[in-house]
Image: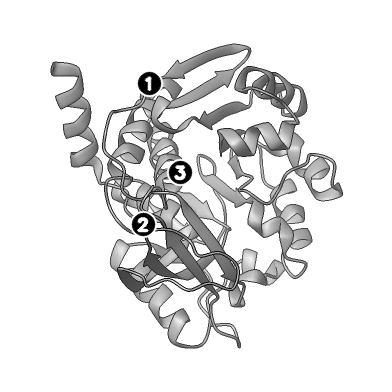
C-alpha cells in the first residue's frame, strides 16, 4: 500500500489570535494562546486522517517541544521513521492569526533543521510511495544537500511531491536546478507559484512551471476560495472551491496538500483528488489552529451536501 514519507520539519506552533498585528514596537492582547504541533505535521495529519499511511522522515528534538511533537504524531497514527532523538530540542513557530483570518509566522529552527544520510536510510522508500519535500528543507545548510542527494537516487516508481512554501522563490539556485527534473507533483498556493515562476497570473505561472518540470509532472496551484488549478500535459482545469466563512487560514494549504496526495494514492483522478482537497481546505479555514484538516467522513459530507443541493 502506498505511503507518504514526509521529509519536512515538524515544529511546535505557539498559536495566538489577535484582532490586528501591532505596529513595530507596539503591543496587543491576544484572545487565545496555545501550543500545537505544526509545520510538516499539518500535511501528515491531513493525509493520515484521509486514509493514507504516513511516515515522518525528519528529526525530532530532546526537550519539551520534541515531546509535544512525538505525542501529536503518535496520536495521529504517524510512524516516526527516525527513532533516536536529536541533542537539541524541536523548533518553535509563533503563529499570529488576525480577525481577517490572515496569519503571520515567526519561526525558530531546532533539531528538525538537521538531517544525515544515515537518518534517511532509516526507512526504505518503496514503489508507489509519495516522498514529500518542503521548500523549507532547502533553506537549512545541515539538511538540504543530503536530502536532495537522497531524493535524486530514488527509483522512478516513487513519486516526489514538492511544496516550495513562501521562502523558496526562484528556480535558479543549484539545489532547485538539481531537484526540478525529479519532481512529479508540484503543490503551492497562487502567490508562491507566481513568485517562483516570475509570472503575473496563474496561467503564465503554469506554463513556466511546465517548462521547468518533467513532461509528466502534475501541478496543483491553490487559489483561495476559488479552489485550485490543476495542470498536466498542457491540460489545465480550475476545480471550484466551497463557500464557507473563514476564521483562520493557518494550515489550510497543508490540509489541501495532504488530502490531495491521499486521493491520488487511493487511485482518484487529479480532478477528484482536487475536489476532495478543496473541501478539506474549506473546512480547515472554519476552525482555529494549524492542523485542522477534516477526516474522510467530513470531506464526504461536505461534497455530498454541496452537490446534492
> From what the image shows, is residue 197 above or below residue 146?
above
Q: Which residue is mark 2?
A: 291
Q: Tag on residue 240?
A: 1
Q: Residue at x 56, y 48 (%)?
A: 132
In the image, taking residue 178 as reference, residue 37 lies left or right, namely left
Q: Secondary structure at mark 3?
A: helix
Is the C-beta separation of discs 3 and 1 under 8 Å?
A: no
Label 2 crowd bin: few (<14), some (14–19), many (20+), radius 10 Å? many
Q: Residue at x 61, y 23 (%)?
A: 202
Which quadrant: the C terminus?
top left
Q: Earlier in the sequence, mark 1 or mark 2?
A: 1
Is the C-beta separation of discs 1 and 2 under 8 Å?
A: no
**In 3D space, how far apart are the residues under numbered discs 3 and 1 (Cα atoms)?**
15 Å
> From what the image shows, is residue 182 above or below residue 236?
below
Is the C-beta separation of discs 3 and 2 under 8 Å?
A: no
Q: Relative to the observer, which residue lies in front, 287 or 209?
A: 287
Q: Is residue 250 visible?
A: yes
Instruction: Kindly indicate the quadrant of the structure image that contains residue 124.
Output: bottom right
Q: Earlier in the sequence, mark 3 or mark 2?
A: 3
> From what the image shows, is residue 224 above or below residue 133?
above
Amino acid at each position: 500500500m502506498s505511503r507518504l514519507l514526509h521529509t519536512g520539519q515538524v515544529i511546535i506552533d505557539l498559536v495566538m489570535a489577535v484582532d490586528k498585528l501591532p505596529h513595530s514596537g507596539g503591543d496587543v492582547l491576544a484572545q487565545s494562546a496555545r501550543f500545537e504541533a505544526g509545520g510538516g505535521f499539518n500535511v501528515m495529519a491531513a493525509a493520515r486522517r484521509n486514509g493514507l499511511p504516513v511516515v515522518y522522515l525528519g528529526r525530532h528534538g530532546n526537550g519539551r517541544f520534541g515531546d509535544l511533537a512525538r505525542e501529536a504524531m503518535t496520536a495521529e497514527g504517524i510512524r516516526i521513521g527516525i527513532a533516536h532523538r536529536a541533542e537539541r530540542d524541536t523548533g518553535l513557530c509563533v503563529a499570529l492569526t488576525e480577525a481577517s483570518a490572515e496569519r503571520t509566522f515567526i519561526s525558530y529552527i531546532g533539531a528538525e533543521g538537521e538531517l544525515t544520510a544515515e537518518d534517511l536510510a532509516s526507512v526504505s522508500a518503496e514503489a508507489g510511495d509519495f516522498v514529500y519535500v518542503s521548500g523549507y528543507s532547502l533553506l537549512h545548510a545541515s539538511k538540504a544537500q543530503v536530502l536532495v542527494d537522497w531524493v535524486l537516487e530514488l527509483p522512478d516508481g516513487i513519486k516526489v511531491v514538492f511544496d516550495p512554501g513562501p521562502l523558496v522563490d526562484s528556480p535558479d539556485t543549484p539545489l532547485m536546478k538539481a531537484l526540478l527534473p525529479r519532481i512529479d507533483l508540484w503543490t503551492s498556493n497562487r502567490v508562491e507559484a507566481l513568485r517562483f515562476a516570475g509570472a503575473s497570473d496563474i496561467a503564465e505561472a503554469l506554463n513556466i512551471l511546465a517548462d521547468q518540470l518533467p513532461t509528466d509532472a502534475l501541478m496543483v496551484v491553490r487559489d483561495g476560495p476559488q479552489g485550485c488549478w490543476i495542470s498536466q500535459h498542457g491540460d489545465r482545469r480550475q476545480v471550484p472551491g466551497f463557500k464557507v466563512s473563514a476564521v483562520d487560514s493557518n494550515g489550510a494549504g497543508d490540509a489541501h496538500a495532504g488530502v490531495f496526495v491521499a486521493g491520488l494514492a487511493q487511485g482518484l483522478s487529479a480532478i477528484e483528488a482536487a475536489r476532495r482537497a478543496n473541501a478539506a481546505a474549506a473546512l480547515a479555514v472554519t476552525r482555529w489552529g494549524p492542523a485542522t484538516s477534516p477526516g474522510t467522513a467530513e470531506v464526504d459530507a461536505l461534497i455530498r451536501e454541496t452537490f446534492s443541493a
